[in-house]
Amino acid sequence: MGLAADLQYRHHRPNPFQRVMQAFASSKPGAWLFSKTLRHLDRALLRVTKGRATVPQLLAGLPVVTVTTTGRKSGQARTTPLISIPIGDTLALLGTNFGQQHTPAWVYNLEADPHLTIVHDRITQAAVARPASEAERAEVMANSAGVYGGYLKYQQRITGRDVRIFVLDPA
């Protein structure tokens, strides 16, 4: 079995309200708003629900995993809720940062130390992130449209940087 099966990863079709929320989140104003507020909202919601729910799960029906990396400067554990994309029997992470121009901090953390802990539906696994090959990048981008269409819009808006894509292997 692969990492996706070990985590019992699954993605459900969003309901009509969740589709509207996904459309808003993938718009330029929606992406900007969520890039500024989501980490604070998720932190509070994760605390209240004891790690069971995030805003993207509830409002947009997205398959969120919680990834804990080691801060490249601080050495402290850094936990970030991220949408994961299935690729074969494992998962991938895209460093789009809501289509914003700067690379998200968790990407730099994984580049400095690729070991991470990933949680989905309260199942925890150790994993190692590696940069996706060109073939894997194409597969991840193709699969991402079926999970969250915003990724394709984000790709179009991002200029001046490469979007890092990581494939997760069990540790």
Image (cartoon, rainbow, N blue to C red):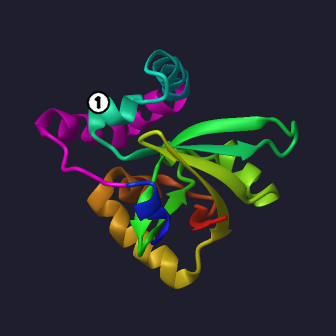
The one nearer the camera, 72 or 128, is 128
Q: Count every numbered label the image shows and give the total.
A: 1
Q: Position of residue 168 (x, y in %)?
A: 58, 65
* Left or right of residue 63: residue 36: right
Q: Which of the 4 quarters of the picture holds residue 28? A: top left
The image shows residue 107, relative to residue 71, as above or below, that is: below
Which SS class for mark 1? helix
Stretch of the chain drawn in magenta: 9-36
Q: Amino acid at mark 1?
A: Leu
Q: Is residue 171 left or right of residue 59?
A: right
Note whether residue 56 is visible: yes
Foreground residue, 76 or 150? 76
Q: Quadrant of the N terminus?
A: bottom left
Residue at 50%, 63% (x, y): give it. 92
Residue 2 drawn in magenta: no
Where in the figure is residue 30, as x and y percent of width and height? Answer: 37, 33
Q: Quadrant of residue 10?
A: bottom left
Main SS of the magenta segment?
helix
Q: Residue at x 64, y 49 (%)?
A: 117
Q: Residue at x 83, y 46 (%)?
A: 72
Look at the image and tell me whether residue 27 can be seen. Answer: no
Res. 146 image quadrant: bottom left
**Circle 1 residue:** 59
Q: Residue at x 55, y 82 (%)?
A: 134
Q: Is residue 25 magenta?
A: yes
